[in-house]
Image (cartoon, grey):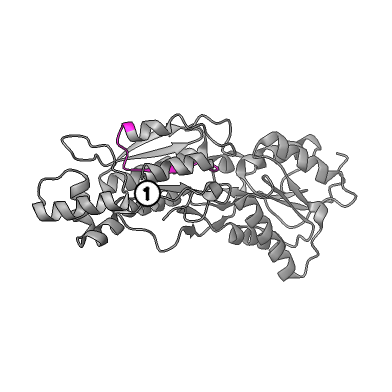
Amino acid sequence: MVRAGSAGVTAGPTLAVVAREAGVSVPTASKVVNGREDVAPETRRRVTEALDRLGYIRRPRFDGGRAPRLVDLVVHSPETSGSGAVLHGAEEAAHDAGLELVVSAALTRSRSERPERGWLDKLVLRGSSGVLFHLAELSEPQYAWLAQHRIPFVMIDPVLEPPPGVVSVGAANWRGGVTATEHLLSLGHERIAVVAGHRHTLCADARIAGYRSALATAGVRHRPEYVRHADSGEDAAGRRMRELLELPEPPTAVFVCADRMALGVYAALAERGLRVPDDMSVVGYDDLPEARWLTPALTTVRQPLSEMAATALRLLLRMMDGHRPESTRTELSTRLVERASTAPPGSRPDGHG
């Protein structure tokens, strides 16, 4: 069962529970729920009684009783590179599974914001069989609404920790932080800073923990002043980079926890007349198209967004068929993509351009 955080709302029984109660298979129980005619009268009676007894909330029926195989993908904005990668992976997996995919925007200014609930009502009206969310998080009432309407869903790369029982797919962020830092250490850097996203978010905390672990393993002293937090925008990341350059002993390398933030870091370095990688090595995270467009091209940790979306779609398909995943959290591996933005330590940046 999926419990909607501290709101205290628990989802009703899954179709698998109903099937077990009625002594039938999950596909047979699904036929009864969807109004199929190829079920024996006695079997239909047992399943119907189990549905009523357990409080199963039936979904709307379409096309003469058959629920359409329709899945929603909800993103904060369809225009970002990250959303594009997620859409690509979800579309391919949906096509392979014979599903129709509907893409919706949740009308938030950034992926760190919670969406309004209005569009949720449309899910039931059009008979969506399940939902993929590429959002920071949902509110407790939204989780409760999904549970009440028995709509299976999977979170793709959530920014904040979902409530217990919520299924999510993400990347191995801790390992990504280790990989980025180990790469800089292997080049001879010891004064390595990190510019991360908001505090107390899943990805930022895990990537910083990996960064610290790599430093500790290498016997390099961790400097708290080298850890800076910003939002995911370019301007804030640029400000954090300027702060690092003003330190009495500035870093010689920086691990930036998002490619988009690296754009701001590049700009801040250029303002001071500092060159990448001669004066400052930079490693990003995501491997979005922006990483290849930068000059020099950005060394970055590839986060497999398309594969994450495809994995989430396959998990959702099983949930739509009444099966619960063995684990609520699936993590896919990351890997370093080396380009031209890293080199051994060069001239010492003095922060005064």
Question: Can I make out residue 161 in this image?
Answer: yes
Q: Quadrant of the N terminus?
A: bottom left
Q: Residue lying farthest right?
A: 248
Quadrant of the image containing the C terminus = top right
- Residue under the image location 88 percent in, 40 percent down: 352
Kind of residue at badge 1: Leu
Name the image quarter holding residue 322. bottom left
The residue at which mark 1 appears reads as 313
Q: Determine whether 306 is above or below 264 in the image.
A: below
Q: Residues within 10 Å of mark 1 (few under 14, many from 20)?
A: many
- How far from the left and from the top, in percent, is residue 340? 64, 49
Question: Is 63 rendered above or below residue 14?
Answer: above
Residue at the location (36% across, 35% down)? 123
Please say whether residue 283 is one of the residues in the magenta stretch. no
Q: Is residue 274 visible?
A: no
Q: Residue 21's spot in the image, x, y percent? A: 26, 60
Q: Which of the two residues, 143 or 290, is positioned nearer the viewer here?
A: 143
Query: Helix or strand or loop: what does disc 1 sit on?
Result: helix
78, above or below 259, in the image:
above
Q: Nearer the viewer, residue 155 or 266?
A: 155
Would residue 339 appear left or right of 313 to someone viewing this image? right
Counting every numbered tag in the picture gives 1
Is residue 129 covered in magenta?
yes
The picture places residue 265, in percent across and down from the top left corner, at: 71, 41
- In the shown orientation, is residue 282 left or right of residue 107? right
| x and y percentages locating residue 316 in the rendered image | 36, 50
Bounds of the magenta segment: 125-137
